[in-house]
Image (cartoon, rainbow, N blue to C red):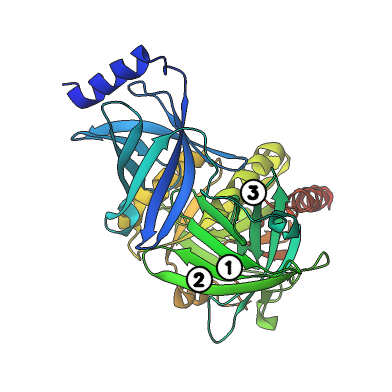
Amino acid sequence: MKNLTFLAATLLLCASGYAQPSMYRAELTLQDSVLLPFFFIWDGSEGSTGHLRNGKEDILMRQVEPKGDSLVFEFPVFNNALHLLVSNDTETLQGYWVRYDAGNVRYPVRMTRGNFNRFLGEHSEGYPALVKEKYALTLESNEIEPTPAIGEFQRTGLQSFEGSILTESGDTRYLEGNVIGKELFLSTFDGIHAYVFKATISVDGSLKGHHFSGKKYARPFHGKPDAQAALRDPKTIATLSPSAQGTVAFSLPDWSTGQVVSLPEATKGQVTIVQIMGSWCPNCMDESRFFADLYREFSSKGLKIIGVAFEKTEDRLAAQTALGKCIRDLALPYPVLFAGKANAATIAKVFPTLEHFGGYPTSLVLDKKGRVRSIHTGFSGPSTTLYADYVKEQTALIHSLLTEK
């Protein structure tokens, strides 16, 4: 039976001349005083897809079976969704971001049709100009050992900016925002990342503020403009112990069938990428898209890629829903093995000779003799200035190893 509320709203939308896609400015309530804005585009028709926008990122969200009076827009890759009610005049959509992956935790969402800035408010004269393109940042996510980071911000309008914040384990992906008063506001929302950055801008361009995420996380960060800011080389962070003699070995079940695959037996004579990843990891999603392209280009020449997934549970069957959705939505053409629960103890058990593991994703490149030729920690994706060089470097490395005798 058709949902009468939805049907009435759809008819009104068409009669009002809004059959074309409409832009909605959405606000996701993270915490009592913290709202995360994002943009949502939808044409109002039954069963049609929506588009969630973060700067240059366009996330296609398909409608699935409604839940009562709510329309359900499913996120790709991540096992979460938006549940939305359409108002009678179609001017507003409201409901919840439902995190199936976290026990159906709900965050209120309200959307208003219209073309607005991401964050509402006027800027102070001159202050947008003080925001620089590159920053050396410190994220106080850990009181004992703060996280070094780089901020990259590109101006897209008088007071608006896009960019990303890079750490050694990965970037925040597509940030978008603007200056209000004397403060810079940035946010991103992709179905699992839900970040707000708020910082006061000093007259020398320095930033000092807070990073908000989830229902409780709020930690300080600060930084200064620095055109030469850099993090450690991602190829020098994780290493193999001398006892490894340059190789890795493991036996793990396929995520779906349970059939055990063993390294190095399964990859003898082939150039191989071992991808340490998880279905919950946004940077792993970006890396997986690149690896899928790499596999399609070089698999016929002998490249093999094996994903090793560390999930939120130690039970392979319990992990299948989230992991299966990730693999299907990314259309991964290479096998993925289940390694257990994502924690330091499990990493040490599966990769006992891998030292100084720096986070998800981490990739190991093996030559035809099974020797590890490169270990790369983290992934700076297409929202960063490092991505293009990484693609060129990794593609050249694979091509070189494939031509070795």
CA neighbours of label 2 inside 10 A, class few (<14), some (14 to 19), many (20+): some
Mark 2 falls on what kind of element?
A: helix
Residue 62 pos. (x, y %): 40, 32
Q: Is residue 232 above or below residue 33?
A: below
Residue under numbered circle 3? 304
- Is 192 on the left or on the right of 197, as rendered? left
Residue 290 pos. (x, y %): 65, 45
Q: Is residue 357 above or below residue 264?
A: below
Residue 248 pos. (x, y %): 62, 69
Residue under numbered circle 1? 249
Mark 3 falls on what kind of element?
A: strand
Residue under numbered circle 2? 350
Residue at (28, 23) in percent of width and height: 9
Q: Amino acid at mark 3?
A: Lys
Q: Are marks 2 and 3 in contact (CB under 8 Å)?
A: no
Lower position in the chain sequence, tag 3 or tag 1 = 1
Lower position in the chain sequence, tag 2 or tag 3 = 3
Foreground pick, 17 / 330: 17
Residue 238 pos. (x, y %): 67, 73
Q: Quadrant of the N terminus?
A: top left
Q: Amino acid at mark 2?
A: Val
CA neighbours of label 1 inside 10 A, class few (<14), some (14 to 19), many (20+): some
- Is residue 167 shown to the viewer in this render? yes
Q: Which mark is residue 309?
A: none
Quarter where residue 58 is shown: top right
